[in-house]
Amino acid sequence: EKRVRSKDFWKRCGAETEGKDDGKICLWKRIAGSRTYPFEYIIRNRRACMADKIEIQRKGKIVVQAEYSGFCHGVSQAIKKAEQAAELYRGEDRKIYTFGPIIHNQDAVNDLKAKGVEICNNIDDAEKDDVLIIRSHGVGKETEDELRKSCHSLVDATCPHVKKIHQLAEKAHHQKKTVVIIGDENHPEVIGIDGWCENQAVIFGTPQDILKPENEERLK
């Protein structure tokens, strides 16, 4: 694997990050050639060794991984909270659910299922002794209140950035302002934001939606 890093990176941590040369992973620096580090070091320090670009050669083919790939912070946090809930309530006679799939990634959903975290899509599917987890997309205020009343414990795994939008939408609505959301009106994140302004937001999915008479009137 060739991992490209800037000159400053190697100045900051070149000497202290050098590991045993076992030929498993090669970190390439633009200026001064290459160095090889043990696989175990990379795994333990993958954040420090994260690269601008990763090129993996397999069977004569090259796969290039983008600099920014994987789960965003909000999704990573949601998965971590779900795993913590599974560990906390392990062995207890109660079920753990995420309210809808925690992420649009079946592998991640299956991994949580193997750890005891199931999915429920309706509030009535959960019982009083169960644990419910709000996924990273978040939910509307009314839905959150209903979830809190319907279960033993509610874990809020809403993405912090989405939570901030909820607060802004609620504040703007209370100030009698029109909240405009650009997005898919059927997407759970958009539905959740709309729920914090009493489902009164103007939602644009396409530029053409702006020209609809009912929307033009509301935006005056």
Image (cartoon, rainbow, N blue to C red):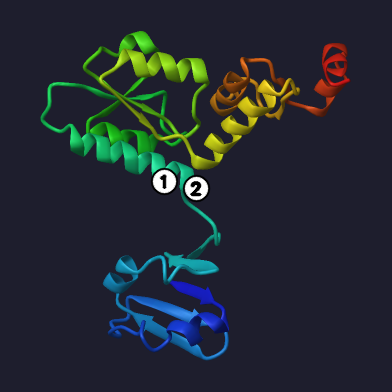
Give the numbered dot on residue 72: 2
> x and y percent of residue 115 in the render?
22, 36
What's the distance in space between the residues labelled 2 and 1, CA to CA?
Answer: 6 Å
Q: Is residue 74 left or right of residue 189?
A: left
Q: Nearer the viewer, residue 143 or 183?
A: 143
Residue occupying image coordinates x 38% and y 66%: 46
**Residue extending furthest top?**
124
Q: Nearer the viewer, residue 68 or 60?
A: 68
Residue occupying image coordinates x 30% and y 14%: 126
Q: Nearer the viewer, residue 113 or 183?
A: 183
> x and y percent of residue 119 in the render?
34, 23
Residue occupying image coordinates x 27% and y 71%: 40
> x and y percent of residue 168 in the render?
63, 33
Q: Which residue is mark 1?
A: 76
Query: In the figure, 52 relative to 148: above or below?
Result: below
> x and y percent of residue 33 in the render?
50, 89
Mark 2 Cα-neighbour bin, 10 Å: few <14, some 14–19, many ≥20: few
Query: In the figure, 2 relative to 47: above or below?
Result: below
The residue tagged with tag 1: helix, strand or loop? helix
Query: In the figure, 26 relative to 140: above or below?
Result: below
Query: For the residue marked with disc 1, what is the amino acid?
Result: Ser
Q: Is residue 30 left or right of residue 176?
A: left
